[in-house]
Image: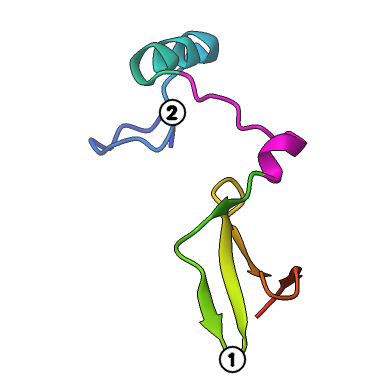
Amino acid sequence: MRGVTHGGKGSGRRPVNKSKFEENHDKIFGKKEKVMEYQPEEVRTAWEESGDPFEWATDTYQLYYNATTGEHKHYNVTTDEWESF
């Protein structure tokens, strides 16, 4: 309510220099870094062994984990194949 004096707090915004405001905001809080939209192929396929091999039924398995993507896979050492559980 502009132009009305009723003694209360107004609902209108004060005039602001937007570019100056953004510049000062960045000085105080820092600029956010851009997040990569993709990951290079060598990073996406960086599988590492996670823990010791284990036996299940008659086969031996090794758990692999990709820290970059958060995926995990089981490798069947006995049959030399990747498996999903």
Relative height, residue 49 to residue 23 (above, below) = below
- Which circle marks residue 13 in the picture? 2
Check disc 2 and give the amino acid type: Arg
State which quarter of the image contains the N terminus. Answer: top left
Check disc 1 and give the amino acid type: Ala
Q: Which residues are magenta?
A: 31-45
Q: Residue at x 60, y 26 (%)?
A: 34
Residue 39 visible in rendering: no
Left or right for 40, reference 24 = right
Left or right for 10, reference 50 = left
State which quarter of the image contains the C terminus. Answer: bottom right
- Which circle marks residue 31 in the picture? none
Picture coordinates of residue 67 (x, y %)?
54, 49
Q: Residue at x 39, y 11 (%)?
A: 27
Q: Is residue 76 magenta?
A: no
Depth check: give the residue in front, 26 or 22.
Answer: 26
Depth check: give the residue in front, 43 or 80.
Answer: 80
Q: How is the model colour-coded?
A: rainbow
Relative height, residue 43 to residue 75 (above, below) = above
Left or right for 64, reference 37 = left
Read off the residue under disc 1: 57
Q: Residue at x 75, y 75 (%)?
A: 79
Which residue reaches farthest left? 7
Mark 2 secondary-structure assignment:
loop
Dominant SS of magenta comes to loop
Picture coordinates of residue 5 (x, y %)?
31, 32
Count of residue discs: 2
Relative height, residue 76 to residue 70 (above, below) = below
